[in-house]
Amino acid sequence: MRRLLVSVAGPALVAGVLLSGCATVPAAAPIADTPKTEAPKAPALTETPAPTPPAGPTAAEAKAYVEAAEQKLGDLGEYAARVQWVRATYITHDTMWLESKANAQLTEESVKYAMGAARFNDVAVDEVTRRKLNLLRLSLVLPAADRPGAADEMAKLSTSLDSTYATGKFSYKGKVYTLDDASNVMATSRDPATLRAMFDGWRTVSVPMKGDYTRLAELANEGAKGLGFADTGALWRSGYDMPADAFAADTDRLWGQVEPFYKNLHCYVRSRLNEKYGDAVQPKSGPIRADLLGNMWAQDWANIYDIVAPKGMKGSSYSLDKLLLQKKYTPEKMVKTGEGFYTSLGLAPLPQTFWERSMITRPRDREVLCHASAWDLDNRDDIRIKMCTQVNGEDFYTVHHELGHNFYQRAYKDQPFLFKNGANDGFHEAIGDFIGLSSVTPVYLNQIGLLDKVPGEEEDIPYLLKMALQKVAFLPFGLMVDRWRWEVYSGKITPAQYNSRWWELVQQYQGLVPPGVRPNDAFDAGAKYHVAGNVPYTRYFLAHIYQFQFQQAACDQIGWKGPLHRCSIYGHKEVGQKLNAMLEMGQSKPWPEAMATFTGQREGDASAVAAYFKPLNEWLIKQNAGQNCGW
C-alpha cells in the first residue's frame, strides 16, 4: 500500500461497518394492576436488570473493517493507478485534472480507514487482522488531526512546500537556474566560485519554506498522537516490526559497521581534492567542503571521479556505452536483456501485456513524464515500466533495477491487498539494486555476449572506486536526513535551530561543511526534495545495506569463491527459487522473516558492504598512510 504524503481527516464509518456500537438499555416493565385493597409490593432488587454498558468494538467488527478497507482501497487504487498512468504518459490539462480527482478520492478514503483503524488498537484480534490494522495506521506519512480544518490546512501546506520546491529558480550572473541546470554545473564545473554559487543559489529557494514546514510538523504531530504515537517520527520508525526506539538503535548499529570504510573513502577523496584545489579551498584535514563533491547534496560523488581516479592505473578497458552501441542494442533489446536476467533465475517471463502497454521510449507526439518507474496497475498481472530509455550504461542498469520492482510486484500478487508491498520500505529498492550489482559486472557482460573477455584484477580498484563513490558515499546522507526530522518532530530542536542542527548532523555523519557561513534565515534541509515533499528517507539507507546483503547471500548459495564484486548470479535457478520465496511473502510477515527466507539472517547486516569493497578498502588504507583521517 502506498504511504500517503498528504492526508485528510474523515469520519470512521465506512462501507457499512459499524465502528461505534452501544447496547440498548431495556425499558422498564409496566407495573401490573393490583387490587386496591392490597398495597403493591416493592420489586426485589434482582428483578431490575442492571444497565448494560456500551459495548466496545469486537474482533468480528475489526475483521469486517479490514475486509471492507481492502476491497474499497483495492478498487480505488486500481482506478487511481490507471489514471496516473494516463497522466504520466499523456500529459494534458485534462489528464492532470483527472489525476487530481482520482488521487483526492483515494487519499480521502485511505485516511478514513487509517484513522478508523486506531479504534481497534486494544481489541484482541487474530495475528493477520492485527497486522493489517497496523499497516492501515502506518500508511499515513502525515496524519491529519481529527478535527475540522486540520486536514485542509495540512493539504495546503503540503502543496505549498511541494510547489515551492518544484518551481524553484535562482539567478547568477544574469542567468536563471533551475535545479537541473545547477546540478549539471555542479557535476562538471571545477571552479570553486561557480560551485559555491550553485550550492548557495539553490538554497535560497528553500528559505520561504520554513514557516510552512514548521506548521506542518505541528499538525502532523497532532495527527500522529491521535493514532497513538508519541510524534510523527515515532510513527515513521514504527513501520519496521520493532519498537520505534529499537529501530533507531538498529540503524545506528548498521552505520557502525560501515562507518570505518566511509571514513577511509572520505580521507582519500579529501586528499585528492586538496591536491586539486589547494589548502585555501580544501584543507588537508577536517571536513570536506560539500560543494566540491559533484552533487547538490554531496550524496553521490561519482561525478568527481576524474579528480580522484587512482594514479598510475589505467581505467576500464571497455565502455559499456560503446559496447551496447557496437552490439546494436535498442531500448527494447535492453529491456529484453533485463527480463532475461530474471528468467535465467527461473522466474516466469513478463506477461505479453507488459510489452504491449509499457512506455519504453519517449513518444514523439506528446508530453510525458520521463522519470523511470515501475508500475503495478491492477495488483495482479498488469505490470509495466515507464522509461525514456537511451542506449547507454546508465539506462542498462536502470532497466535491471526497475524490472526488480515488477518481478517483486508480480510475486506477491496473491497476497491480500494490504500485504501487496515490500517486506519493509527498504526492500523494494534493494531488490532492483541487488540485481543491478550483477548487471554491471564484467562477468555478466561477458555471459550475455556484450564483453568478449573479462578484465583482470588490475581493473578492480577503478571499478570499485566508482561504485563506492555512489553507494558508500550515500550511506551517511541516507541516515542523517531522517535523524534531523526525528529531532524536529520530537521537539528536541526548535525552528530557530533547524539550520544549525542540520549542518551539525551533516558534519557528524558525512564529515562535510558548507562552503561558507550560512545565512540566519536559511532552511537548507528544505533544499532536498524528500524534506520539502515529506518523503521518509531511511528506506534508502536500508536499501543500500540490504542490496549487498542479498548479493552475498546469493553468491554463497551458488558456491562463489572469488571476490564478491565479481560475482554474477545470472543463470542460477537455485537463487531464483529462494529469492521468489521471499518476494512472494510481500508484507504478510515481519520483515526479519522475509530476510531469513533468502539470506538465513533475521537482521540487517552491513558486513557484506565491507566484503564487497574489501580490495578497495585495503588499497585506500595504503593511500591514506600519513594522513590525519577523520574530521
Image (tube, helix red, strand yellow):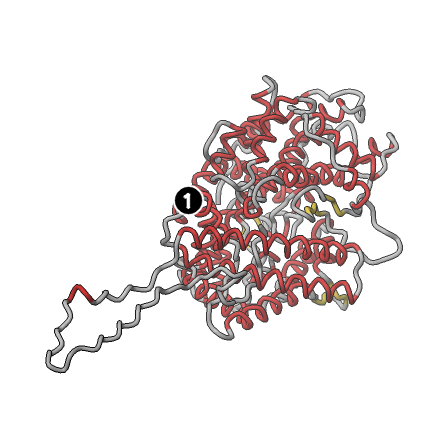
Residue lying at 67% horizontally and 53% vertically, measured from the top left: 78
**Total number of numbered discs in the rendering:** 1
- Does 47 sit left or right of 297 as displayed? left
Q: Secondary structure at mark 1?
A: loop
Label 1 crowding class (10 Å Cα cut-off): few <14, some 14-19, many 20+?
A: few
Specify the amino acid type for callout 1: Asp
Give the answer, above or below, for where 375 lies relative to 194: above
Residue lying at 57% horizontally and 61% vertically, measured from the top left: 109
- Does 575 sit left or right of 338 as displayed? left
Q: Which residue is disc 1 drawn over?
A: 126
Residue 343 in sight in this render: yes
- Does 146 sit left or right of 320 as displayed? left
Q: How far from the left and from the top, in percent, is residue 14?
A: 52, 62
Between residue 21 and residue 301, name the one nearer to us: 21
For this orientation, the residue located farthest to the bottom is 36
Q: How far from the left and from the top, in percent, is residue 8?
A: 54, 66
Q: How far from the left and from the top, in percent, is residue 333?
A: 83, 35
Between residue 454 and residue 444, name the one nearer to us: 444
Residue 270 position by quadrant:
top right
Between residue 155 and residue 52, name the one nearer to us: 52
Give the answer, above or below, for where 403 lies relative to 552: below
Residue 168 in sight in this render: no
Q: How far from the left and from the top, in percent, is residue 511?
A: 52, 47
- Does 221 sit left or right of 158 as displayed? left
Residue 303 position by quadrant:
top right
Between residue 279 and residue 576, name the one nearer to us: 576
Give the answer, above or below, for where 111 lies relative to 378: below
